[in-house]
Image (cartoon, rainbow, N blue to C red):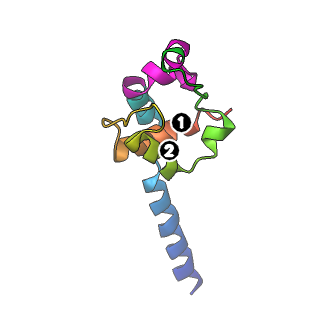
Amino acid sequence: MKRVIWNAGLSLFAAGLALAGDAAAGKAAYDKSCKGCHGSGGAPNASIAKSLKVNMLHLGDPAVQKLSDDELKSVLADGKGKMKATKSVSGKTADDVVAYMRTLKQ
């Protein structure tokens, strides 16, 4: 019985790992699709923020990091405020970008 429970727990753990994004792949996608506005390493591009008249947070800011993975993926898919949807970042790529964003935590 203990072995069955152990195997079930191990399977659930492995399934959870398979769902997590790849931060290295996420950085590459971020650099291609997000870096222009959100800057290198998540620091906002000041000239973009000024031209849009918005206060952009660093992506490592606690206010950004407290969002769930699904909320972050929703922002990527649908946009938010003056940020337009990022159509090139979806599915597994969105998981990867979120994984990279998590590495920016301040």
Q: How crowded is mark 1: few (under 14 residues within 10 Å), some or many (20 or more)?
A: many
Instruction: Residue at the far top: name it.
Output: 47
Please state the horizontal and vertical placement of residue 19, each as a whole percent of the image. 44, 55
Instruction: Residue at the far left: name it.
Output: 88
Please state the horizontal and vertical placement of residue 72, each as a whole percent of the image. 50, 44
Q: Tell me the amino acid under the disc marked 2.
A: Leu
Span colored in magenta? 31-49
Q: In this view, does 20 lie to the left or right of 78?
A: right
Residue 54 magenta-highlighted: no
Q: What element carries label 2?
A: helix
Q: In this view, does 37 lie to the left or right of 55?
A: left
Total number of numbered discs in the rendering: 2
Please state the horizontal and vertical placement of residue 31, each as a whole percent of the image. 42, 24
Q: Mark 2 or 1 closer to N-term? A: 2
Hey, which quadrant is residue 32 in on the image?
top left
Looking at the picture, does residue 54 appear above or below residue 61? above
Q: Nearer the viewer, residue 72 or 48?
A: 48
Q: Name the residue under label 2.
A: 72
Q: Tell me the amino acid under the disc marked 1.
A: Met
Q: Residue at x 36, y 41 (%)?
A: 93
Q: Are marks 2 and 1 in contact (CB under 8 Å)?
A: yes
Q: How crowded is mark 2: few (under 14 residues within 10 Å), some or many (20 or more)?
A: many
Looking at the picture, does residue 42 appear above or below residue 75? above
- Quadrant housing the C terminus: top right
Hey, which quadrant is residue 27 in on the image?
top left
Q: Mark 1 points at which residue?
A: 101
Please state the horizontal and vertical placement of residue 64, each as a whole percent of the image. 61, 39
From the image, state whether disc 2 or disc 1 is nearer to you: 2
- Quadrant housing the N terminus: bottom right
Q: Is the magenta stretch mostly helix, strand or loop?
A: helix
